[in-house]
Image: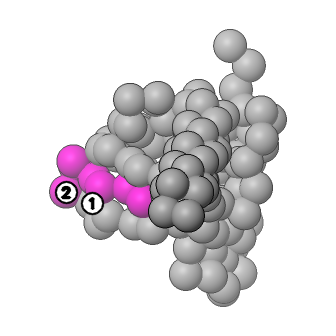
Amino acid sequence: MNYLKLLSLALISVAAISCSRDKKEELAKTWQVSDIETETELVDSIKNAMLLSSTMQFTEDGHYTTSGGIGADQGTYTLDEEGKTLSTISLAGRNSDVYTIEELDKEKLVLSRKGSTITCKAVKQ
């Protein structure tokens, strides 16, 4: 009986780790920020300035960089076991943040945090 419980727990753990690894592989690329939505509507000129050349880059070894109108930053990130929560720790003195991953596939990344949503498209390499 204990053997079956241990085996079940091991299989669940492997599945959770595999899911997180798959999500990390999908995340690990350069993303072009294509849209930003906030609780309060942004003036078009401000929104356009934020979108201008804004990119987010994630690497498989757990590092990230941002650039462009959203601001320059770099640091480390982690994903939860389900691949639904992205936590960042800034090395540039900016705030650390926790994002909900609303959507992630080969072509699209949608992050939300505190009433804001960031939509990104994969940059073709």
Q: Are marks 2 and 1 in contact (CB under 8 Å)?
A: yes
Looking at the image, residue 55 lies above or below residue 111: above
Report if residue 120 is visible in the image.
Answer: yes
Instruction: Pick the residue in front: 65 or 44.
Output: 65
- The local secondary structure at tag 2 comes to loop
Image side of residue 38 versus residue 106, left or right? left
Badge 1 amino acid: Arg
Badge 2 amino acid: Gly
Residue drawn at x 72%, y 63% as measured from the top left: 102
Report if residue 57 is visible in the image.
Answer: no
Identify residue for label 1.
Answer: 94
Image side of residue 22 versus residue 99, left or right? right
Is 52 covered by the magenta stretch?
Answer: no
Please state the extent of the stretch shown in magenta in the rendering: 87-93
Identify residue for label 2.
Answer: 93
- The local secondary structure at tag 1 comes to loop
Instruction: Pick the residue in front: 69 or 96.
Output: 96
Estimate how packed mark 1 is, as few (under 14), some (14 to 19) or many (20 or more) residues with alpha carbons within 10 Å: few
Q: Residue at the top extreme?
A: 125
Q: Residue at the front extreme?
A: 1
